[in-house]
Each structure stands twice: as structure tokens, then as C-alpha cells.
Image (cartoon, grey):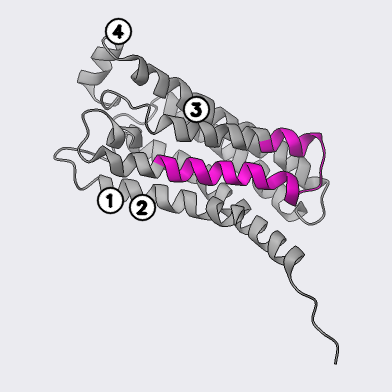
Amino acid sequence: MLGGFAVAGPLLFTLAWLIAWPVQDDYSPRREEISALAAVDAQQAWIMILGFLALGSGTLALGLALPHAVRRGVSTGIGAVLVSLAGVGIIVAGPVRMDCSGELAACDARVKAGDVSWHHQAHVVISAVVFLSLVLAQLVLAHAFHKDERWRRLRTYSAISAVATLVLLVIYAMDVVQDSGGLMQRIFLAVPLVWIAVLGLRVLRHFAGTTASPVPVS
């Protein structure tokens, strides 16, 4: 069941922003970040808030499942904690909403003038913690997977995914591609979200294998 939640989380999160985007009077997915769809000034913000809750719950479910599915060790424990931390952060980030879209000039001016609420600032900080936790989790779990032959095939994938996540995060944070912050965020987020879903599928297979009934011999 936990693996199923991990698979569903990224899918529901993506579906949420795809639904929430068209109901805005003025929103550019190329220019504006996903969090803007749940901002205080967003229309039908509850759609994206539910998306955050779904993704956070799925990520937390993965973190809780990993110690029972991967060979126990220090790296498995740390990796599971980092995934769980990211999950809790995403759950909190949904209701702790931004005031406005940080990629827009008017909102950026408010931020620089200190004219934003505590929850706007908290959302930004929580998001940074979530992003870094996911990068570290992928690296640590790549090491854990190397020690477990059942998961070894995901070691290289997790390491590559971690590096790709970090590189894309830096590009997004530095705003290298002008006026395309929303697009870059979506590209960057796609990497760890796919990783979460892939691990969720592997967890499903693991528990399906351990609970399968033996085939009777005739």
C-alpha cells in the first residue's frame, strides 16, 4: 500500500497543476512556478493544495516503506529519513502558502521590500529544504542500493538522478533561463518525482513478492 501511495503522489501532483493552471485568469506555466497556483491570490487554490498534500503523503509513504524493503544499514536509515523529511515538508508547504507568484516583478518587489507574510517566507524556506533533502536522499540511497542485490539495479539510476536534480536545481535557482522560471522548475522537479514513482513501483514489487502465496505442488 505504501508503494502505491508513492506512485500516486507524483501523478496526482502533476494532475493538480495541469487542472489548476487553466482556471487562472492570468497564469503562465513557462514563467511562473507551481506554488503560485496555491498562492493566496490564486484562483481555486485548493486544487494545488490538494496536489501538495498528495505528493507529500506519497513521498512520506515511500520514506516509511524503505526501511522495510531495503537491506537495513546506516545509509538506508538516513536515506529513508531524508525522503520522509521531504514528504513532511511538502505536506506543510501546501497550506503554508505564498502571497503571490515569486516569478512576477510585482511580487519580487514585495519580497525585496519585506512586504510579504511569514507564511510566504516559510514556504520558500521549506521548499529549499525539500529540494536539498531529495538530492541528498537520492545520493545516500544509491549507496544503500549497492549493498542490497535486490535493489542494486537502481543504484546507478539514483546517482544519475541525484546529479541531474542538483544541476537543474542550480540552473533554476540562478534563473539562468530568463522569464522561464516556471518551465525550469517543472523540468527540475520532474527528475526527483519520477525517481519517487520508480522507487514506489519497486516497493510494490517487493511487498508483492514477500506476501505472495507459494504455488501448491500437485
Position of residue 118 in the picture relative to residue 4 (left or right):
left
Disc marking residue 175: none
| Residue type of the residue flagged with mark 1 | Ile
Nearer to the camera, 48 or 28: 48
Which image quarter is the N terminus in? bottom right
Which of the two marks, 3 or 4, is nearer to us in this view?
A: 4
Which of the two marks, 2 or 3, is nearer to us in this view?
A: 2
Report the magenta residues as a range.
52-80
Whether label 2 touches label 1, CB < 8 Å: yes
Magenta stretch prevailing secondary structure: helix
Q: Earlier in the sequence, mark 3 or mark 4?
A: 4
Measuring from the top left, give residue 144's x and y in whole percent: 77, 42
| Residue type of the residue flagged with mark 2 | Leu
* Residue at position x 53%, y 50% in the image: 194
* Furthest residue toward top: 113
- The residue carrying mark 1 is 19
Disc marking residue 114: 4
